[in-house]
Image: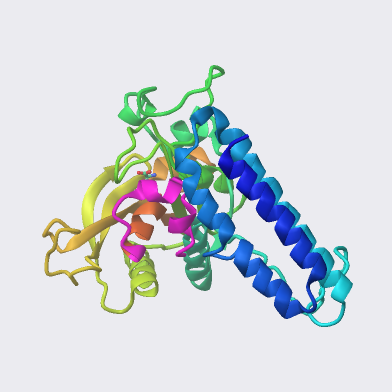
Amino acid sequence: MNDIIEAVNRAAADAEMKAAAAADAGALEALRIEYLGRNGLFPELSKKMGSVPPEERKATGSAFNTGRTRIQNALDEAMARLGGAGAKADKDAIDLTLPGRKAAPGHRHPITQLADECVSVFRRMGFVAVDGPEIEDIYHNFDALNTPDDHPSRDPKDTFYFPDGRILRSQTSPVQIRVMETHEPPVRIVAPGRVFRRDTPDATHGMNFHQIEGLYIDKGVSMADLKSVLQNFAWEMFGKDVNIRLRPHFFPFTEPSVEYDFSCVVCGGKGCNVCKNSGYIEIAGAGMVDPNVLKNVGYDPEVWSGYAFGLGLERLAMLRYRIPDLRFLYDNDIRFLEQF
Ligand code: DAH
């Protein structure tokens, strides 16, 4: 036993006695302040902890705890004895006047919110939202989409293969095939979903990300229809000042194919570091559905034509919310996610 333990025990015993003798709630509060208050005896004594030899620290610490509890109990008992105002009620009673504990419900992930928003924009333009499997077969992900056998995206270095030969879909485009296989034209669908690629994660790449696929098949569909839908989508998402630009490109499942860009929503097209001074930001691929794809699903390309597009949701989110690194979206840091 050291001096501090002794002092603590003595203080506790003193306080107990004084509490038992206290005449009113005011006297009890004065006692509380004297012993446990911020500048009271206990905090004063605990400053001496530093001088206690290590082997006595534990015992000293527990003497403090016991002392504090003894004093608090003595005060509580005295308060109960005095009854009336300020007395501590039965420990089990529920105080109905206390404000409730606030439940903290979560909310949907920003990418889910954005996907829903895109879907509702396309829905207003007549599209129906559909779903497809994340585990796909080679036929739907590549073959039926007219992808040549030597196309680099088939390489196991780029796409995740299961031992049985199935894959994690590398794009949402296979949903086009699944819908056309099971529905007669006309079809007008969008398919939001997760896709997987063997990319090394960095600020703009992840091993999985999200796309929205679009497909419209009808009689006499033209590239002008595609352009107007994409332009409308840009306006709905970023306001009337946004322009779009189509650039020739190649995709196996569309002919002709384009990539489509938004005029930079940060600088308004003047050129800045976000758009790398080009004034435009790439958003998606698109094109007129290749007749081979239509044949693969049993549609007659002489009768039916259409367009397809696929856009990257993370890219859109980064622009929309000015997120500099898409990994923020997947770190599950509540301080980040809470903002949406
Ligand atoms: N599937 C393409 C990709 O992941 C994007 C794409 C391009 C989808 C053109 C389409 C399209 O439907 O017509 O890069």
Q: Foreground: 188 or 71?
A: 71
Residue segment shown in magenta: 320-340
- Most foreground residue, 36 or 115: 36
Image quarter for residue 268? bottom left
Going by the image, does 151 lie left or right of 169? Answer: left
Q: Quadrant of residue 11?
A: bottom right
Residue pictured at 56% horizontal, 47% vertical: 180
User: Depth check: 76 or 263 in front?
Assistant: 76
The quadrant of the picture occupied by the N terminus is top right
Q: Is residue 36 magenta?
A: no
Look at the picture and state if 299 lies above or below 126: above
Answer with left or right where residue 31 lies relative to residue 215. right
User: In the image, residue 122 lies at what x, y percent?
Assistant: 48, 67
Please name the residue shown 80% across and 77% down the image: 23
The image position of residue 339, as x and y in percent, is 45, 64
Query: Image point 36% across, 28% down: which residue?
Result: 158
Q: Position of residue 146 (x, y in %)?
A: 40, 36
Q: Residue at x 38, y 33 (%)?
A: 147
Residue most extreme to the top? 163
The verdict on residue 333 being magenta is yes
- Specify the quadrant of the image occupied by residue 101: bottom right
